[in-house]
Image (cartoon, rainbow, N blue to C red):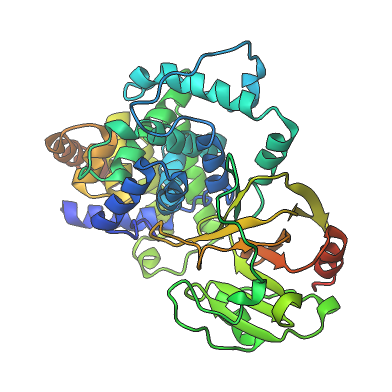
């Protein structure tokens, strides 16, 4: 008689052959967008008052209260409603829209931090990774191999001055020029599992690059990186200048491009469109 | 198949502490780590085309319920329990959709063979029969089989996910295996 162990092993083997679709690539952005709208997970949070809001329909309807959730549901629903309200102003609506952009999270903060000084994108471009170790220059081909995706290099800028790979081999950094005139292009395979987290406090402009979703962040913003353990690296905290972000689907998954150093949206778009 | 959460408990505790401190972005790490198995569980439990919604909803609810999460229990089974509940809610008033889902997942393997040595261990016919047999199990038994074997959760995680005592996991697995063995012997 076949014993249980055989059957158990067979079931495990069966499970490994069952193919299911991976989670949708923008799951993290969607979840974070909704979290931004609800109360932080502190019991102290008071139920916000519910105004005259029928806009609720735009939020995925909450499923029936589960046993675990029932007690919480009252204020959770209220919080979602308030969230929707908060998103009504055009700027915030735009921000929510943009939350879907590749490996980027755009997050509004109430006010600029006290110490905003924009630094050149070159200030760390030749740079150090989040861990502080200097990055070794590599060829473009090597960078592509390390990050696992082809890099569409903007021909408008000519060959890059330097190419490095940072953040544990996940981000290719291409730099043109030096000093104040530096242009920097970060490329990484991103779904949101790992990528940028940006904090902005002014409007963000949605745009398109060759039929791909793109976003222009025209005002200074903070650049942070979130690593796999959830630590945020601001490398060091610096404000980035105007930045264009666009996302290109590829066989390796979505590849996020982040171009910093172009002075206007038009110029940034010209560079981006020249990327092969 | 990456069903393992690539994070140890101390790391997880650190991430959770950040989330509790109000850093919602840290939650992205937990979402990333656990989304694949959450999705798999949702699909194999029969959430169908709504599996992505179930997973998203589960992460949002888990976040909101975080004050009641007890450290040490493990975030994964706790999250998966919400996935199970969400999927059950979805299925009320529906037919046994999970069955079809499992079969769809199994059929996909027929056209898209996985180069896994384990694949060879289970012949195609035998596998199809096994899928059918698992589908035929009563819900409570099919759930423990799905968690413990198809998703390779530990017994403790299976208990946490299904919100049943570990002893019940053992007894249900025992009954499920006996039933499956009988069905397969008759096949």
**Which is nearer the eye, A61 or A39?**
A39
Q: Is residue A208 left or right of residue A226?
A: right
- Assign the N terminus of chain B to one quadrant of the image: bottom left
The residue positioned farthest toward the front in the image shown? A114
Q: Is residue A58 above or below residue A23?
A: above
Quadrant, the C terminus of chain B = top left
Q: Quadrant of residue B4?
A: bottom left
Give the percent coordinates (x, y) of residue A112.
Answer: 60, 47
Q: Is residue A34 above or below residue A233?
A: above
Residue A250: image x %, image y %?
Answer: 68, 65
Judge left or right: residue A80 versus residue B75: right
Residue A148 picture location, percent across and down: 58, 74
Residue at (56% x, 22% y) in the render: A82
Does residue B14 sit above or below A47 in this rendering? below
* Closest to the observer, A249 or A166: A166
| Residue B157 sits in quarter | top left
Query: Which quadrant of the figure has residue B10?
Result: bottom left
> Looking at the image, can residue B147 be seen?
yes
Q: Residue, x 38% and y 37% (percent of image)?
A: B135
Q: In front here: A239 or A86?
A: A239
Q: Residue furthest left?
A: B167
Residue A171 in percent (x, y) is at 57, 72
């Amino acid at each position: 008689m076949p014993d249980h162990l055989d059957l158990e092993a067979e079931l495990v083997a069966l499970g490994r052959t069952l193919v299911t679709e991976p989670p949708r690539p923008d799951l993290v952005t969607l979840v974070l967008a909704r979290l931004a709208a609800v109360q932080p997970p502190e019991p102290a949070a008071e139920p916000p008052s519910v105004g005259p809001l029928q806009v609720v329909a735009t939020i995925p309807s909450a499923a029936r209260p589960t046993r675990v959730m029932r007690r919480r549901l009252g204020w959770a629903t209220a919080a979602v409603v308030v969230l929707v309200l908060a998103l009504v102003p055009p700027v915030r609506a735009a921000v929510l829209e943009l939350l879907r952009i590749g490996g980027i999270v755009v997050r509004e903060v109430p006010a600029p931090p006290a110490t905003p000084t924009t630094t050149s994108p070159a200030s760390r471009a030749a740079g150090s990774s989040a861990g502080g170790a200097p990055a070794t220059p590599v060829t473009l081909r090597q960078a592509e191999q390390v990050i696992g995706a082809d890099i569409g290099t903007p021909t408008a800028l000519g060959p890059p001055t330097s190419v490095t790979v940072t953040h544990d081999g996940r981000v290719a950094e291409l730099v043109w020029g030096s000093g104040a005139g530096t242009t920097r292009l970060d490329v990484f395979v991103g779904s949101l599992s790992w990528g940028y987290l940006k904090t902005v406090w002014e409007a963000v402009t949605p745009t398109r690059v060759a039929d791909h979703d793109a976003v222009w962040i025209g005002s200074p913003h903070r650049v942070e990186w979130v690593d796999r353990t959830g630590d945020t690296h601001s490398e060091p905290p610096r404000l980035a200048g105007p930045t264009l972000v666009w996302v290109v689907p590829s066989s390796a998954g979505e590849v996020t491009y982040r171009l910093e150093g172009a002075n206007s949206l038009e110029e940034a778009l010209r560079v981006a469109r020249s990327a092969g | 198949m990456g069903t393992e959460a690539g994070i140890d408990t101390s790391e997880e505790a650190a991430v959770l502490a950040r989330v509790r401190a109000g850093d919602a972005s840290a939650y992205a790490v937990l979402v990333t780590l656990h989304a694949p198995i959450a999705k798999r569980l949702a699909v194999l439990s029969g959430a169908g085309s709504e599996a992505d919604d179930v997973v998203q909803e589960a992460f949002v609810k888990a976040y909101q319920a975080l004050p009641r999460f007890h450290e040490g229990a493990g975030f994964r089974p706790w999250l998966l329990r919400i996935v199970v509940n969400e999927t059950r809610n979805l299925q009320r008033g529906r037919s046994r959709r999970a069955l079809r889902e499992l079969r769809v997942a199994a059929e996909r393997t027929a056209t898209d063979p996985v180069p896994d040595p384990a694949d060879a261990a289970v012949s195609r016919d035998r596998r199809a029969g096994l899928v059918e047999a698992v589908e035929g199990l009563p819900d409570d038994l099919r759930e423990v089989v799905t968690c413990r074997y198809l998703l390779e959760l530990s017994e403790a995680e299976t208990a946490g996910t299904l919100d049943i005592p570990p002893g019940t996991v053992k007894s249900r697995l025992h009954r499920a295996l006996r039933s499956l063995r009988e069905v397969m012997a008759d096949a």
